[in-house]
Image (cartoon, rainbow, N blue to C red):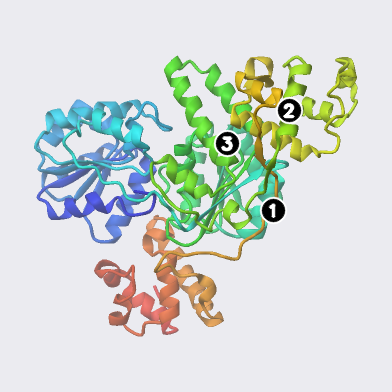
Amino acid sequence: MPTGSGKSLCYQIPSLVRQGTGIVVSPLIALMQDQVAALTQLGVRAAFLNSTLDADAARATERALLAGELDMLYVAPERLTTSRCLELLDRAQLALFAIDEAHCVSQWGHDFRPEYLQLSLLHERYPQIPRIALTATADPQTRTEIIARLGLGGARVFTSSFDRPNIRYTIVDKTDARAQLLRFIEDEHRGEAGIVYCLSRRKVDETAEWLQSKGVSALAYHAGMDTRSRTGHQARFQREEGLVMVATIAFGMGIDKPDVRFVAHLDLPKSVEGYYQETGRAGRDGASADAWMAYGLVDLVQQRRMIDMSDASDEYKRVSVAKLDALLGLCETAGCRRVRLLDYFGEASTPCGNCDTCLAPPETYDATSAAQKALSAIYRTGQRFGAVHLIDVLRGKAGPRITRWEHDKLSVFGIGEDVDETAWRGVFRQLVAMGFARVDHEAHGALRLTDASRPVLKGTQQVSMRRAVTRVRSTRRPLRSGSVPVADLSAADNTLLERLKAWRLTQSRTQSVPAFVILHDKTLAEIARQRPPDLTALHEIAGIGAAKLERYGAALVGIVGGRVGD
């Protein structure tokens, strides 16, 4: 099931109705802490065991488990598989085992974690205890591996749609990525929470600092930071509104923040699964959100270099290249991006009307002549140069580097002067994506011809390409049923909403939990719209259950009635 669709209910409800405690295997401390905080707000007896607890707190949690006082206990896989923890579970009454983020067991996946391989012992040690594995990102190959490695051969498989219709996908040709990102944030998401992914720690720090200099409230997050700073930044992002987190992929899986309005990529992810997982952190509340990425040939060069230079096996490298090629196909498609994305996960769909290629369809053209010129330039220059140099040759720009190599005397010099630099970048990028050329990282990103280029050069194969277009901002902002656009509120309702948010912020700080754990934005917006006069009316609003009515009802009704809430 996709991110934010309610997978956790699949083990939370059984944990409540079955005898014993549900044991939830969760890979990240932040994730289990937020989930336990949210469950506790709802009156559920939940706890976690992880390294943040001191010895006394850990022993108290263990005693509560053995006394049958917990509905759910969250444990990291590396702790679960210790002899101490297993002996503890042997003495407890267990309702079920839930293995969250189960794609981590796949050695071919985008987020493999070796400790997940040890979870097969649950099948061997507790054969009578039900087990459920859950993930948002698993292509057919990964699903097969999850079943095999976790001993779930006799289990039923439930696969819902991978579609997140509230997310609009946009991939732009990279020119000046930081400036493009800033325009995107200022035009569409000023003052809203978002995540910006970069490939390197240095780029994370530089981008966060640059955004701050441009007036954007931005924080950095990567594994090279000291633990205190990293934890502090994550806590601020979770609890404050309107912050932009610039991060490596070390940040994300544990983020349960529902009001992230955009996820942006300044570098190409490694695979479609990685892209889907990361973009899925936007719009978990069901309201409209954006997945935006700037992509260029340099990204492909970088990713291929990382694959080729890794110490992984040849088979793993082959799979990694295939996954990267699938992502390139998504980036270069002239059709609906959502159709291409869902097809990767084995799901058929129709054009969505809510991605850049649907909202502003790219023009395709017969690029056979341009392809022949570009491939000839690669060949005539000795297959030793990257796209920047080759474009200068084609456009007839006789700089020092060109004249030193005497490339101004080649027959291809200047034959593409009628095509601008941006268009030529698109041609070379698509030639690589189509397999007519390849990047040689050992030759510093030089482009080389492949065997597939021969029919094109001989004129026996035509080539069709996408023409670069200026993306048009769409006014269509589709929402899921039940989501509340704040724009639909009156001025008076918005004033009330701000008072409700200020109250929630106070509660958040007092209880040291993220604001959304208190109440979601759309619940507050619905309160502002309906203005419930009493507890009975407040209880009718989605998101106000019995526990929250008892805990916050009087304060909320007081705020609606113009009285100060506690």
- Would residue 309 be found to the left or right of residue 319 on screen? right
**Residue designated by label 2:** 372
Q: Secondary structure at mark 1?
A: helix
Dot 2, how many residues are within 10 Å of its Cα: few (below 14), some (14-19), or many (20+)? many
- The answer to whether the residue labelled 1 contacts the one labelled 2, judged by CB atoms less than 8 Å apart, is no
Using the numbered discs, state the Cα–Cα distance from disc 3 to disc 2 in whole angstroms.
27 Å
Q: Secondary structure at mark 2?
A: helix
Q: Quadrant of residue 54?
A: top left
Numbered circle sitting on residue 268: 3
Using the numbered discs, state the Cα–Cα distance from disc 1 to disc 2 in whole angstroms.
36 Å
Relative to 185, say whether 86 is above or below.
Answer: above
Q: Earlier in the sequence, mark 3 or mark 2?
A: 3
* Residue 223 seen anywhere in this rendered image of the structure: no
Residue 84 picture location, percent across and down:
19, 29
Relative to 204, say whether 400 is above or below.
Answer: above
**Amino acid type for the residue under numbered disc 3:** Leu
Using the numbered discs, state the Cα–Cα distance from disc 3 to disc 1 in whole angstroms.
19 Å
> Which residue is drawn at the image coordinates 47% and 68% (left, top)?
501
